[in-house]
Image: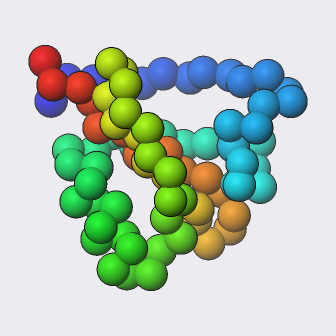
Amino acid sequence: MKGATIWSPFAADTTYMDPGTSSFMINFRVDNLDALLTALRAENCNVVDATEESEFGKFGWVIDPEGNKVELWEAPVG
């Protein structure tokens, strides 16, 4: 699987990191977002209920034990 490392700053007043408590967010590329979110919920992880799907792929989020929002991204097919 090919990929890239991207650093993308957000405006200081962004709410994109909510409900996390940090000013940054790590994004992990995953193979099957739905299956991963199901497994994380089964382990009682703090999974954000909302997901998004667009031409850029599928996105889901979890909150780590320190309050940081972590983004999970499944790339679009093709």
* Residue 15 x %, y %: 76, 38
Query: Left of 21 or right of it: where is 1?
Result: left
Viewer-nearest residue: 49 or 39: 49
Quick check: 36 above or below 9? Answer: below
Q: Residue at x 58, y 62 (%)?
A: 63
Q: Position of residue 75 (x, y in %)?
A: 27, 30
**Relative vertical location of residue 62 with respect to residue 18 in this rendering, above or below:** below
Left or right: 50 as drawn, with respect to 55: right
> Measured from the top left, where is residue 5 in percent x and y?
42, 24
Q: Residue at x 68, y 37 (%)?
A: 16
Viewer-side residue, 54 vs 24: 54
Name the residue located 33 percent from the left edge and 80 percent from the top edge. 42
x then y, percent, for residue 66: 68, 68
Position above or below: 21 against 67: above
Quadrant where the N terminus is found in the figure: top left
Q: Inspect this view and state whether residue 54 appears.
A: yes
